[in-house]
Amino acid sequence: MASTKVAPAQSDVAQKIAMYKSQFALRQFETRAYDLFLENYVKGTSHLSIGQEAIAAGVAAAMRPTDWTFATYRGHAHTLARGVPMTPVFAELMGRTNGLMAGKGGSMHLTSVEHGVMGSYAIIGAHLPIACGAAWSAQYRGTDQVAVAFFGDGSVNIGAFHEALNFAAVWKLPVIFFCENNLWMEYTRTSDVTAVVNPAADRASAYGLESIIIDGNDADEVYEVTSRAIARARAGDGPSMIEAKTYRHGGHSRADPGKYRPAEEIAEWMAKDPIPRYRLRLLESGVSESELLEIEAQVNAEVDDATEAAKAGGVPGEDLLMKDVWADGGAAWRN
Amino acid sequence: MAQLTFRESIARGIAQEMRRDESVVFLGEDVGAAGGVFKGTVGLLEEFGGIRVRDTPISEQAILGAAMGAAMTGLRPIAEIMFSDFFAVCWDIVANEIAKSRYMTNGQMSFPLVIRSGNGGGLRFGAQHSQSVENWAMMIPGLKVVVPSNAVDVIGLMAASIRDNDPVVFLEAKSLYSSKMDVPDGDIVDTLGSAKVLRQGSDATLVALGAMVPRALDAAEELATNGINCTVVDVRSLVPLDTATILREVSATGRLFTVEENPRLCGWGAEVTSIVADEVFYDLDGPIVRITTPHIPLPAADALEDLAIPSVERIVTTIHKSMNS
């Protein structure tokens, strides 16, 4: 099986610290989101990225503010990593008027166009062709914007994935297909229901793409490989697909304790937790413990403040219910 | 003034808007070099080039996904789904993604796009290439649904759909593609959500859509010779729906007959019927009658297909019987 060897990380110290802060913030946000569920502040469902933060942080660091993210229903981390503040995301989870979409989208549909977060999509694979469309628009208008579409290992067996890959290759679109392979397709082991070992990478050659597999728990590696793919897309050399091996520490969604996973597997991946690993790397490279503690304290305070600010938001009412079905702002379908 | 077929009007309408606005792009299967399987897009590739008029693989989800992604980032795409039956393989993108995303994002995104598609029967193509799916589209909040019945309306409603900032499902009755009419020179721009009264009578109001409009007109002609004078309303746009015109014309005659190509259950006429019953019930002089295709998959044989889709004869007989009972 082909795999791309990755050069050691070259990003500078300030950026590494920023990537650490981003990963730590994503972890603290998701942990708090889980607590808010237990306290019944957050209703419905939610899919946390705990354990997969290196991907969101590393990819976002490789993107320009004008680039586009297309996330899945496991999209809190990707949304925040593009710079969306915590308060409106917490508030959206809680269904408040100060939510990112005033409570009309919820956890699975986080969107912030001003940050280039062009939606989180809850139908598996649907956003892959949509990302192609954004990339086509950049290509047509002659901008050098790039679209990055995240998806899980479970998405590779749905038709839209294959349609999008072929389409992007044929039209040479500036789009990055980024597979977060966390080994589990909801409650089923992906390898039990997938014809190839590496769900995304082993399909790449079918679309004339390079097979790229990386350690998704290493933010530096994610950053480096994504940067290369983005540069290629900006240069007009077409799409790339990256498969990042990772693991979600919890279950698929709020309702799932994830007990179907063997204890040894969990232990193995907990030992590869991206955040302590990255922290240690920073310390070894000369960053001081006190600096990291200060960053962590800042993030924790931000999470606390954002939680309270979100809770203070209003409850949406009828005015929002009937708003924005149409571009004129309303919901009228007749005269 | 030139005589144009319905199919020629499609290319003319699209070309009119592509000349005016560089953000208008067009994609679909066989739409460029081949000029469309129904020859509705002949000449567009030659005039606008392969970057604006793009042939796609047979990937309906990719076609509509690409249209959606392009629309949310500033283009005004027109996407062709060759036969409306094929909506069944990409309905997620239409119903879950395009239709809902403005609302879900609290208005952060706009989807100024048109999905045009050959719709309905009459060409003996059988059950998977002949359905009338206007009722599928109509029931999804967030989609506008436009169905022209003649060449002039094709141009004007196409222009209005392209200029509209919401997603429009534009259904072209395949059985009308070869129909002809005189089309004025110059740009034509119509208005969505405006029904047209094509004929005025005092006895009954026929409300029809798409391919059923010429049949309703022919039926009205024949009924007039039997002393039943009918108003014929061309709905033209199911969403937005011009209920003001429909209600006014039903109140004026006291009778409503809908003429629908879609299969019976939950056809657009059922919604019209419900609105009329709610709002002008006391103006009615008799029962509301829906004339539809029965609730069956469409058969291929010409004799059977002709029995299924409302014919002029069936419209005349049904109205005659109802008016004289």
Image (spheres, helix red, strand yellow):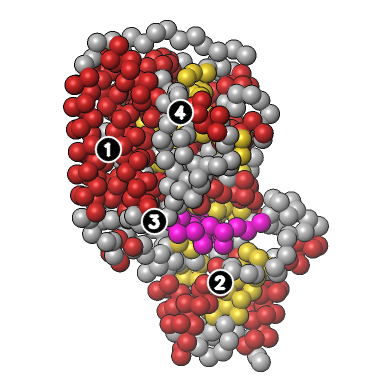
Residue B147 falls inside the magenta stretch = yes
Q: Earlier in the sequence, mark 1 or mark 4?
A: 1
Q: From the image, which quarter does the N terminus of chain A lie in?
A: top right
Question: Which residue is under mark 2?
Answer: B269
Q: In the image, residue A70 lies at what x, y percent?
A: 41, 35
Q: Amino acid at mark 4?
A: Met
Element marked by disc 3: loop
Tag 1: amino acid: Val
| Front label number (1 vs 3) | 3
Gap in angstroms between the C-alphas marked 3 and 4: 28 Å
Residue at position x 29%, y 16% from top?
Answer: A282
Q: Are marks 3 and 2 on the same chain?
A: no
Which residue is under mark 1? A84
Magenta segment boundaries in residue numbering: B131-154
Front residue of A104/B236: it is A104
Which of the marked residues, 3 or 4, is nearer the chain's N terminus? 3
Q: Quadrant of residue A159?
A: top right
Q: Identify the residue shown where x is 61% and y is 35%.
A: A189
Residue A169 percent coordinates (x, y): 54, 23
Q: Are marks 1 and 2 on the same chain?
A: no
Q: Which mark is residue A270?
A: 4
Q: Nearer the viewer, mark 3 or mark 4?
A: 4
Question: Which residue is identified by label 3?
Answer: A43
Image location of residue A291, percent across then percent down = 19, 21
Q: CA distance from mark 1 to mark 2?
A: 46 Å
Tell me if mark 4 has few (under 14), some (14-19) or many (20+) residues whose alpha carbon lies within 10 angstroms of its own: some
Q: CA distance from mark 3 to mark 2?
A: 39 Å
Chain of the residue that carries numbered disc 1 in the rendered image:
A
- Horizontal side of B196 relative to A17 (left or right) equals right
